[in-house]
Image (cartoon, rainbow, N blue to C red):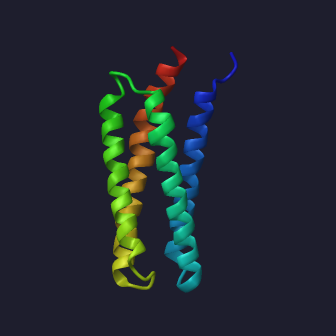
Amino acid sequence: MAPSHNLDAISLLTSQHDVVDDLIGKIEESSGDERAKLFEEMADNLAAHARIEETLFYPTIMAKQTESLLLESTEEHLAIKRVLADMLDLDVDDPRFDAKLSVLKETVRHHAREEEEGDLFHEARKLLSA
């Protein structure tokens, strides 16, 4: 059986999670202009990723068995966007930036790895295979 485009979407979303994780690690290890450049790249990636999920992927997999996961995922996106907005107002060398980066890292990893890859994508595969 040939893979559907929706299953390819799951692979794409997972690879985007990997890119964001990698960028967070690089931000943690960098400073100054390089750090600011990496942060901008990560923020752009997160914004694009959330938009893809919210406008294309989530509506495609909306069902009774995914509804609560999708509502939670949308709320987690809002939390991530709030932290990003706060960080955009800070200099990358501000100590509050590091604190917010830590919160962002934990929130993104929980959302992406535990919620989406651990639960939501599994449910999506079941729905899409039906």
Residue at position x 47%, y 33% from top? 121
Q: Is residue 5 left or right of residue 104?
A: right
Residue 119, x across and y down, in percent: 40, 34
Closer to the camera in the image, 96 or 84:
84
Direction front: furthest residue: 55
In which quarter of the view is residue 8 placed?
A: top right
Residue 118, x across and y down, in percent: 43, 38
Q: Is residue 53 left or right of residue 82?
A: right
Decide: is 19 above or below 111. Answer: below
Decide: is 94 above or below 103. Answer: below
Q: Is residue 65 left or right of residue 36?
A: left
In which quarter of the view is residue 72 placed?
A: top left
Residue 88, x across and y down, in percent: 42, 73
Q: How many marks?
A: 0
Closer to the camera in the image, 79 or 24:
79
Residue at position x 58%, y 75% from top? 37
Residue at position x 48%, y 21% from top? 126
Q: Quadrant of the N terminus?
A: top right
Residue at position x 36%, y 28% from top? 66
Decide: is 41 above or below 63. Answer: below
